[in-house]
Image (tube, rainbow, N blue to C red):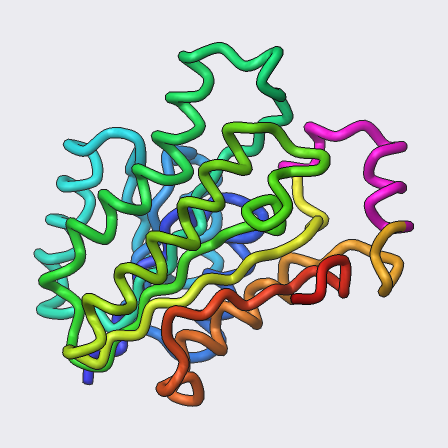
Amino acid sequence: MTNAVVVVGAAGGIGGAIARRAAEDGYAPLFLMDRDEAALAGIADETGGTAIAMDTSDATSVDRAFAAVRAQTSALYGLVLAAGLVDNGKLADLMPDRWREILAINLTGPFLCCLAARDDLAEGGRIVTLGSLAGRTGGVITGTAYAASKGGIEALTKSMAQELAPRRITVNCVAPGAVETPMLAAHPPERKAAMSAATPLKRMAKPEEIAAAVCFLLSEDSAFTTGAVLAVNGGLRMD
């Protein structure tokens, strides 16, 4: 079985933590993709992974990135889709161009990556997507497009889980609540304090805690788990 893993969005706060944890867990070769080339290079140096510049909203860029992976390994074990863009715009403030941008990066991008990697995934491989609590709540704090994109990620995950099950490829989603990353800079301090106060565990998640959940779903221990949405939200929502 191949041990090769691709992490899309590896330059982000959560994506970088996933890349580090995947490297610690022995996944290699490790292919790291993001459009932020400078930050990506730093994560690649830190983890020993291969940096591949890629814009998830551009189908040509996605195809080129996965062709580069294909040139270096015959098959993939894991694909982690952690790229994303947060937006707080509600319907009254949301312009169509912004809607298209959020959906292109957060939902169409993961679809394009799965399409590009589908035939390269080995029997018994893993796909892990990144959802959000907003996909279940409709985005109490976050905006309309963001919530819609993350709800779509859950549906995409479940649909692919059914389709790929005959190849023993599991497809699961990790849905965080608030996580201490640079992306939270979109929220004012008082809003972040309110997030922590509303959470039963009275804090936000660390990126490393999300990475641990992702790497569980990459591992052999999760072989009988597919189509699942793993909530990592400190008890803020209990389904």
Magenta segment:
183-197
Q: Is residue 44 visible?
A: no
Q: Is residue 210 visible?
A: yes
Q: Is residue 169 left or right of residue 136?
A: left
Q: Residue at x 72, y 34 (%)?
A: 141
Q: Quadrant of the N terminus?
A: bottom left
Q: Is residue 93 left or right of residue 5?
A: right
Q: Residue at x 61, y 64 (%)?
A: 231
Q: Position of residue 15 (x, y in %)?
A: 49, 52
Does 232 appear in magenta? no
Q: Quadrant of the C terminus?
A: bottom right
163 relative to 11, above or below: below
Q: Position of residue 37 (x, y in %)?
A: 39, 35
Closest to the observer, 10 or 40:
10
10 relative to 168, above or below: above
Q: Is residue 73 left or right of residue 91?
A: left
Closest to the observer, 66 or 113:
113
Q: Main secondary structure of the magenta part?
A: helix
Q: Residue at x 19, y 33 (%)?
A: 59
Q: Residue at x 64, y 38 (%)?
A: 139
